[in-house]
Image (spheres, rainbow, N blue to C red):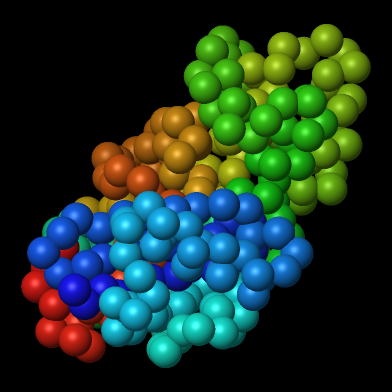
Amino acid sequence: MKCVMGIDMGSFRVKGVLWCQGSESVTFECPSGGDFEATARRAQKELLLISGRSANEIVGVLSTGYGSKSVMFADETRSDIACQCIGVHALFPSARTVIDVGDLHSKVFSLDENGAPLKFLLSGNCAGGSGRVLQIIAKVMNMKVEEIGEVSLKSKKPVDFSTGCVVFAESEAVSRLAEGVPKEDLLAGIHRALSSQINSLAERLGIEEDVVLVGGGARNPGLVKTLREVMGRDILVPEGPHMTAAYGAALLAGSLYNFKEM
């Protein structure tokens, strides 16, 4: 049986999708770690184990993401925006604006009715505009980043952060905690600050509906809620929003071998 694989080597996590003709796709993810090449090979091995397939059945591998060139067994490499557009379009054909909240950057890009990318904007070098700020604030509060979204939803009085810079936001969070401000109010405030930066980026690009939110940040219910409020519009979130680039990479690899749709 012929199979293809899509590997999204992100700076924080690696995501993989294995798709074999006549069967459902399987997925795997784990922290990227310090050795991207070794992590990519682990993802390849785990996908084969989960699916029960052999390496000989893989006819094509396409890599994408921050560390895509470290996927030494990949046959092709494409940009994460190209793969995101393909993945999102397959899930939401009506999508015209995509917001990708990643570990290092947030991106906003538009796509046409065929899923082809049109234009994009990237957040600045400061981590205050990406998912990294949530990791830093979670560490300040001695919490797991996976927990902070749910906790933020309990807020009754979100804190107004006076800066979008992650360094000053961290310092401000420490000071507010010392003053006895509830964690949920601090977390709601940092989610709103990040949402405001993302919204500004989207407005600069130009927003056209439907809007889809992907990336690791889209797994955070607090960010999804505040971003909808700040943007004042509905935002679609796929199941497994962090997997869309890997899914798109697998789809693109499949198109090279005339696979049917997943």
Image position, residue 156 (x, y; %)? 56, 10
Image position, residue 131 (x, y; %)? 61, 49
Q: Of residues 247 and 185, which is closer to you in this image?
A: 247
In the depicted structure, whether residue 14 falls above or below residue 178 = below
Q: Residue at x 77, y 13 (%)?
A: 181
Question: Where the N terminus falls, by quadrant?
Answer: bottom left
Q: Residue at x 39, y 43 (%)?
A: 231
Q: Residue at x 57, y 52 (%)?
A: 30
Q: Of residues 18 and 56, which is closer to you in this image?
A: 56
In the depicted structure, whether residue 207 falls above or below residue 38 = above
Tell me the quarter of the picture where residue 102 sits.
bottom right
Q: Is residue 198 left or right of residue 98?
A: right
Image position, residue 128 (x, y; %)? 69, 51
Visible residue check, residue 23: yes
Question: Where the C terminus falls, by quadrant?
Answer: bottom left
Q: Residue at x 49, y 36 (%)?
A: 220
Tell me the quarter of the picture where residue 33 sits.
bottom right
Q: Of residues 22 and 237, which is closer to you in this image?
A: 22
In the depicted structure, whether residue 142 falls above or below residue 162 = above
Image position, residue 56 (x, y; %)? 34, 80
In the depicted structure, whether residue 194 falls above or below residue 117 = above
